[in-house]
Amino acid sequence: MPKVGFVSLGCPKNLVDSEVMLGVLTREGYEITTSPAEADVIVINTCAFIDEAKEESIETVLEMAAYKEHGRCRRLVVAGCLVERYRDEIREQLPEVDALVGVNEIKEIARACRSNGDLPVLDHDGSWFLYSDRDPRILATPGHTAYVKIAEGCDHPCTFCVIPRMRGPFRSRRAESVVAEVIDLSRRGVREVNLIAQDSTMYGWDHGDRRGLANLLGRLDKVDGIEWIRVLYLYPTTLYDELLDIVADSSKVCKYIDMPLQSASQTVLQRMKRGGNRRAFLRMLERIRERIPGVVLRSTFIVGFPGESEEDFEETLEFVEEARFDRLGVFTYSDEEEAASHRLDGAIPVELRRERRARLMEAQKRISLEKNRAWVGRTVPVLLEGPSAETDLLWQGRMQGQAPEIDGVVYLNDGITAETRPGDIRRVLISEAYEYDLVGAVVP
């Protein structure tokens, strides 16, 4: 069988799709190679959420297409979100591409790699894809950690987002399937699972279980071998107390709440078609901190949304300074032609969007440094990941409050021995703090 080179772009949810496609290809007998120069077929799983992601996807397609000219590659397959949004444009403008695989055609990846011509456009009425524990999957993450997608799609009407158009309505996996997958991952050596969905808080609602995520976490808490369970992408208006309680009470569920708020201005939130306001958010954060002592809070914000006045932005800036998040991501508004916000008036110049992002991030840097300094002198469990990508002289790891590839890390400057292995959880004494990262030593 031919060798397949695979490039995965975008978020962890996209990475899980890539891992399922890798599993399908491996089951069909394909050999996977990390070198595009050795590949007979190259697959690019693309992202198209915002302009920067689209540009990266197109640049990667063109870069990989060069291997058809100068390498052994004979077939180029483009998969994922870019296909869902721009299938016809790819056909017309990128003749180098031999086959297109949308997010609902993942199981057809082997056929795309070997067949002539394009795959048909599937009928999305009732055919939205949702993987299960029975689908093959090859992990692309380090062996000790994995993402588990518990739901797909979204029902929220956020005006800036095109996810529902690409990935369809919200639909949860059955709890039995998620538990079976996590048990299998544990048997394969995984110690940390990160649960992901477009809105993890709504898990189970489509099956009539309004406390589905809390119930699922209770079951996963009993899986032997799994040490850390982290939930990503909680939605503020669907958060409920039973969920907070199991996060507080479980020894395995990380005391980590990742909840994108996007803005603190009620005017902007209304134009985004999102609920909440500054005062309600502050009450919610207070409630979370009361119910989960020591919780690490992360959020994301969008600046430069159409119609965002200087007063609106200042309200968000003041809110961030008052809320004191441990982690914060800030994005400039990306004007997507298929999003409802594209039709709103009051466009903000790109330079002003960037300026507002810089101001908000500068405020958060001061808060993050203060928050990190509070860890100095404390001994905390750290999941060791291996030698640092920054320097061969140090190892790195993460605390429960540091999600992989999203937050900072703990650099380890002492206590690493020949017996130390990636995936070990060790006690680390924190000695230094920076804006995003910490430094410490493994202690007995």
Image (cartoon, rainbow, N blue to C red):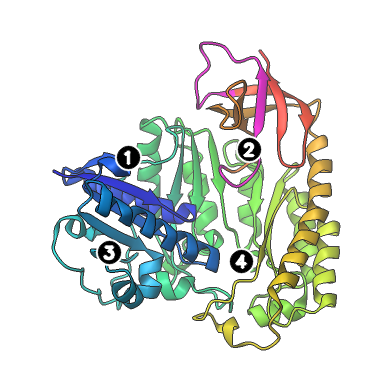
Residue 293: % across, % down: 75, 43
Q: Amino acid at mark 4?
A: Thr
Counting residues from the start of the chain, the first of labels 2 and 1 encountered is: 1
Q: Which residue range is magenta in the image? A: 404-425
Seen in the picture, residue 307 relative to 1 is either above or below; the reply is below
Of circles 3 and 2, which is in front? 3
Q: CA distance from mark 2 to mark 1?
A: 34 Å
Q: Residues within 10 Å of mark 1 (few under 14, many from 20)?
A: few
Q: Quadrant of the N terminus?
A: top left
Residue 343 seen anywhere in this rendered image of the structure: yes
Residue 443: % across, % down: 68, 15
Counting residues from the start of the chain, the first of labels 4 and 2 encountered is: 4
Q: Quadrant of the C terminus?
A: top right
Asked if labels 3 and 4 touch by Cβ distance under 8 angstroms, the answer is no
Of circles 4 and 3, which is in front? 3
Using the image, tell me which numbered label, if any, was put on residue 238: 4
Instruction: Tell me if residue 421 is in the magenta stretch.
Output: yes
Label 2 element class: loop
Quickly name the residue at label 3.
97
Of circles 4 and 2, which is in front? 2
Task: Locate residue 129 relative to residue 341 in the image: left or right.
Answer: left
Using the image, tell me which numbered label, if any, was put on residue 267: none
Q: CA distance from mark 4 to mark 1?
A: 44 Å
Of circles 2 and 1, which is in front? 1
Residue 285: % across, % down: 76, 57
Label 3 element class: loop
Q: Amino acid at mark 3?
A: Val
Quickly name the residue at label 2.
400
